[in-house]
Image (cartoon, rainbow, N blue to C red):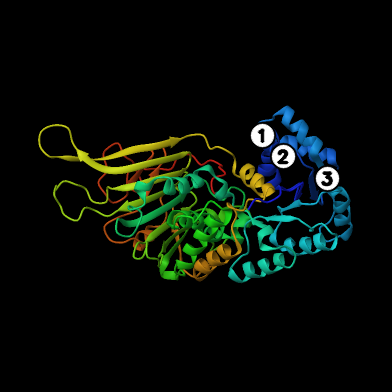
């Protein structure tokens, strides 16, 4: 059902880091595309004036994109600012006045979750929630109990249909391409099921460390930061059944149904790692037990996927920055050609950097005799990333389209899945920067196949334990495959 669009955008945390890195560039892009032409009201407690906020916005788009003078001038005209404390009723009285005749404001909480409750209560008391929607940032809770409490707080003021839980990973072009690839190509349907799939691997690797986010990482760790949300959403889109229709709830229904089928993790299903040197990072405890790496084994108890292990690996200070999904197909049931290498039939979806779809198969080597070779066919390559995630997601939220936002049951099921491996449930294993993590991660895998290490330069998946041609990167953890220079990148952050 089509929802009426919002007629004002209020964003709390207007002077914060997220606004500077993501929101202002997205707002300028939306103005340039003609999808934003309503009042934009920033709220923060910084002692600033509106002019200072406009200058901050200009610096933001210059540093994190490029200035479009015409679009930025229009954004400046739309931009208002309220300087006030979130615990002060007067701040919300000013907001109600600034909203004027707006009937359907969108409130975006780019603030710590601890402030969600007080802000929601004062929004309601000041009359700012009538006909309104609300967008809340991740992390949505710290565990299952806190997520449920946070949902209860929001539901005390807003209906579920008006709550948009933002996971910027769902706004990535590549992640949506995954969904389109599955359900726009009928030939894939008989392949993506337990009869044809041996296992699935999902890797999110980053060459850099915590990049100045030591305090946040000490509170989160890799599992809370990217597994409970980003990686589980990818798993859900990859394994869900076809949506019943094109309505915005159909995809969320499919993901929620998959999550309900995923077994709760136990310590035996996870290997936690921490790169050497993490404890020397700023705002990190010298005896920290927080993981910067996690390898996990998931099982989906559904008719389609029963018995197919899904391995997820995330980590910092790894050899490459790349996110990829590799579906490893079962080997032929009989050995017709003795020289065929095992586990060389796969479908690989590179999600970052860029979008690439690769098919691994075996073909006859040219010349006399029946000798084969492993071949990789690039079926699709897309260098451009399309709309930036926050551009796409804020546009959708203003339009009332919740397709790419996590629903209450999705969030709580995701926390239920990882609850048993949070904190120090599993021992911490060290690993050297520039390697593929602790060697213990290999123990999670079924015998006979190692991790498929993504290589964005070649656009291929390299079986770590299978023979590789001389031009291929060395197996993971090898000294011959050093990490490229560390770089600050927004991938997965």
Q: Secondary structure at mark 2?
A: loop
Q: Kindly tell me whether residue 196 is visible in this rendering.
A: yes
Tell which circle, 3 or 1, labels the residue nearer the N-terminal end.
Answer: 1
> Vertically, is 384 above or below 327?
above
Question: Mark 2, residues whose alpha carbon is within 10 Å: few (<14), some, or many (≥20)?
Answer: many
Instruction: Tell me if residue 477 can be seen.
Output: no
83 relative to 342 in the view: left or right: right
- The residue wearing badge 1 is 33
Q: Horizontal and vertical percent for residue 247?
A: 56, 53
Query: Which residue is disc 2 drawn over?
Result: 36
Marks 1 and 3: in contact by CB < 8 Å? no
Marks 2/1: CA distance? 8 Å
Q: Secondary structure at mark 3?
A: strand
For label 3, the residue is 81
- Tell me whether circle 2 and circle 3 mark residues in contact (CB < 8 Å): no
Q: Residue at x 44, y 58 (%)?
A: 241
Look at the numbered disc 1 and give the secondary structure of its residue: helix
């Amino acid at each position: 059902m089509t929802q009426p669009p919002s007629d004002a955008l209020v964003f709390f945390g207007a002077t914060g880091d997220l606004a500077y890195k993501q929101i202002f560039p997205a707002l300028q892009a939306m103005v340039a595309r003609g999808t934003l032409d309503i009042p934009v009201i920033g709220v923060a407690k910084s002692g600033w004036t509106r002019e200072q906020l406009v200058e901050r916005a200009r610096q933001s788009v210059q540093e994190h994109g490029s200035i479009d003078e015409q679009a930025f001038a229009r954004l400046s005209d739309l931009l208002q600012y309220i300087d006030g404390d979130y615990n002060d009723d007067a701040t919300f009285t000013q907001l109600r006045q600034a909203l004027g005749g707006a009937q359907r404001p969108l409130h975006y909480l780019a603030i710590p979750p601890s402030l969600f409750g007080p802000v929601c209560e004062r929004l309601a008391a000041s009359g700012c929630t009538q006909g309104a929607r609300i967008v809340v940032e991740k992390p949505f809770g710290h565990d299952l109990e806190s997520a449920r409490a946070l949902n209860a707080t929001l539901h005390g003021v807003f209906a579920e249909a008006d709550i948009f839980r933002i996971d910027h990973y769902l706004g990535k072009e590549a992640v949506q391409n995954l969904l389109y690839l599955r359900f726009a190509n009928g030939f894939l349907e008989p392949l993506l099921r337990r009869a044809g799939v041996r296992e699935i691997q999902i890797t999110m690797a980053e060459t850099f460390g915590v990049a100045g986010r030591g305090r946040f990482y000490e509170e989160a760790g890799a599992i809370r930061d990217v597994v409970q949300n980003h990686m589980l959403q990818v798993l859900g889109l990859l394994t869900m059944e076809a949506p019943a229709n094109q309505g915005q709830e159909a995809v969320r229904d499919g993901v929620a149904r998959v999550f309900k089928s995923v077994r709760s993790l136990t310590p035996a299903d996870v290997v936690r790692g921490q790169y050497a040197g993490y404890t020397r990072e700023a705002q990190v405890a010298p005896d920290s037990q927080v993981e910067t790496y996690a390898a996990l084994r998931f099982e989906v108890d559904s008719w389609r996927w029963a018995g197919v292990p899904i391995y997820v690996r995330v980590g910092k200070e790894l050899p490459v920055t790349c996110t990829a999904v590799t579906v490893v197909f079962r080997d032929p049931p009989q050995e017709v050609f003795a020289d065929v290498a095992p586990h060389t039939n796969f479908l690989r979806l590179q999600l970052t950097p860029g979008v690439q779809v690769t098919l691994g198969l075996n073909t006859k080597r040219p010349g006399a005799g029946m000798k084969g070779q492993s071949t990789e066919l690039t079926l699709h390559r897309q260098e451009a990333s399309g709309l930036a995630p926050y551009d796409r997601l804020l546009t959708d939220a203003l339009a009332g389209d919740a397709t790419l936002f996590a629903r209450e049951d999705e969030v709580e099921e995701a926390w239920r899945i990882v609850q048993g491996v949070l904190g120090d449930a599993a021992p911490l294993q060290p690993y050297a920067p520039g390697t593929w993590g602790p060697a213990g991660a290999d123990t999670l895998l079924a015998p006979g196949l190692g991790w498929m290490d993504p290589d964005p330069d070649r656009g291929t998946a390299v079986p770590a334990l299978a023979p590789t041609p001389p031009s291929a990167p060395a197996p993971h953890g090898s000294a011959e495959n050093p990490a490229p220079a560390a770089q600050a990148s927004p991938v997965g952050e």
